[in-house]
Image (cartoon, rainbow, N blue to C red):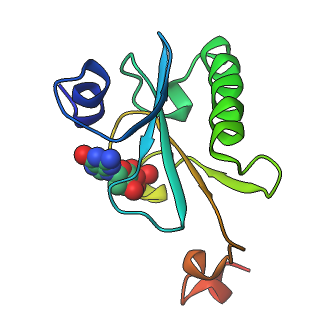
Amino acid sequence: MCIFCKIASGEMNTNKILEDESFLAFHDVNPKAPVHILVIPKTHIEKFDDTPPEVMAQMTTFIKKVANLIGVDKSGYRLITNNGEDAGQEVAHLHFHILGGTKLSWQHLQDTNSKEFI
Ligand code: DGP
C-alpha cells in the first residue's frame, strides 16, 4: 500500500483539514509556503494522466471547498500536480498541492539551465 493510501485509510496519522467519502486534504509534511496542503483521492490513482475526467471534476469541487475553508480563495493560491518522473513526482498517488498564504514567486521553479530551453 502506498503512503497516501495509508493516510487515506487512517493506517497512518496525518493533520487532516477536510475529508469526504472520496477525497482528503491534509498538511504537507514539508511545507514550501505558509499554506501548503495536499489533496488526494482516497482510491489509488497514480497520477494526473491516469485520472478519469469525472474524478477530476469532483476533485475540482473539493479543492475549491478546501481553499474556501482555509481562507485562500480570496487571496489566491497556486495549484500544482507533479505528473511523473520529469515533473519530480515523489509519491505515486495523485495529489494536488495547494500553496498560498503569501505572494508566491516562480523562483524555486527556475532551472539554472533554463535559457537552454527558451
Ligand atoms: P510530489 O513531489 O509532488 O510527489 O510531492 C509529494 C509531497 O508529499 C511532498 O511535498 C512531501 C509530501 N509528503 C510525503 N510524505 C508525506 C507524509 O507522510 N505525510 C505528509 N503529510 N506529507 C508527505
Q: How many marks?
A: 0
Residue extending farthest to the right is: 74
Residue 10 visible from this viewpoint: yes
The image shows residue 99, relative to residue 51, as above or below, that is below
Counting from the top left corner in percent of width and height, residue 76 is at 78, 56
Counting from the top left corner in percent of width and height, residue 2 is at 22, 31
Residue drawn at the location 36% of the way across and 21% of the way down: 44
Which quadrant of the figure contains the N terminus?
top left
Residue drawn at the location 55% of the way across and 82% of the way down: 111
Counting from the top left corner in percent of width and height, residue 104 is at 68, 72
The image shows residue 110, relative to residue 98, as above or below, that is below
The image shows residue 78, relative to residue 10, as above or below, that is below
Dividing the picture into quarters, in which one does residue 31 lie? bottom left
- Could you tell whether 46 is left or right of 59 in the image? left
Residue 89 visible from this viewpoint: no
Residue drawn at the location 39% of the way across and 30% of the way down: 46
Dividing the picture into quarters, in which one does residue 58 lie? top right
Which quadrant of the figure contains the C terminus?
bottom right
Counting from the top left corner in percent of width and height, residue 82 is at 50, 50
- Could you tell whether 56 is left or right of 41 in the image? right
- Could you tell whether 117 is left or right of 93 in the image? right
